[in-house]
C-alpha cells in the first residue's frame, strides 16, 4: 500500500470477501497492493 491517494474503482458482490489487488500505481510508478476500504459516510 503506497497511500498515494490513487485508486481503482471495481464492483463486486456484497457477499464476497473484500478485494485486494496488485495493480500499477502511476504516482510511485510501480505495482502496489490496493486494499478495499469502507466508504466515508457524509452525515
Image (spheres, grey):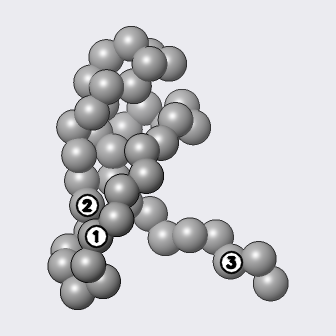
Tell me the crowding category of disc 2: few under 14, some 14 to 19, or many 20 or more residues within 10 angstroms, Cα based. Answer: few
Quick one: quadrant of the C terminus?
Answer: bottom right
Name the mark nearer the viewer: 1 or 2: 1
**3D distance between C-alphas at marks 2 and 3:** 20 Å
The residue tagged 2 is 19
Query: Residue 13, image x and y in percent?
Result: 26, 78
Residue shown at the point (34%, 65%) measured from the top left: 11
Does the residue at mark 1 contact the one at mark 2 (Cβ under 8 Å)? yes
Compared to 12, does 32 lie above or below? Answer: above
The residue tagged 3 is 41
Q: Secondary structure beneath disc 3? A: loop
Whichever of callouts 1 and 2 sits on the residue coming sooner in the sequence is 1
Q: Tell me where residue 18 sits by quadrant.
A: bottom left
The residue tagged 1 is 12
**3D distance between C-alphas at marks 1 and 2:** 8 Å
**3D distance between C-alphas at marks 1 and 3:** 20 Å
Q: Is residue 42 left or right of residue 38?
A: right
Amino acid at each position: 500500500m503506497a497511500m498515494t491517494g490513487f485508486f481503482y474503482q471495481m464492483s463486486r458482490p456484497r457477499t464476497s470477501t473484500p478485494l485486494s489487488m496488485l495493480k500499477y500505481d502511476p504516482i510511485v510508478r510501480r505495482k502496489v497492493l490496493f486494499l478495499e476500504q469502507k466508504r466515508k459516510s457524509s452525515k
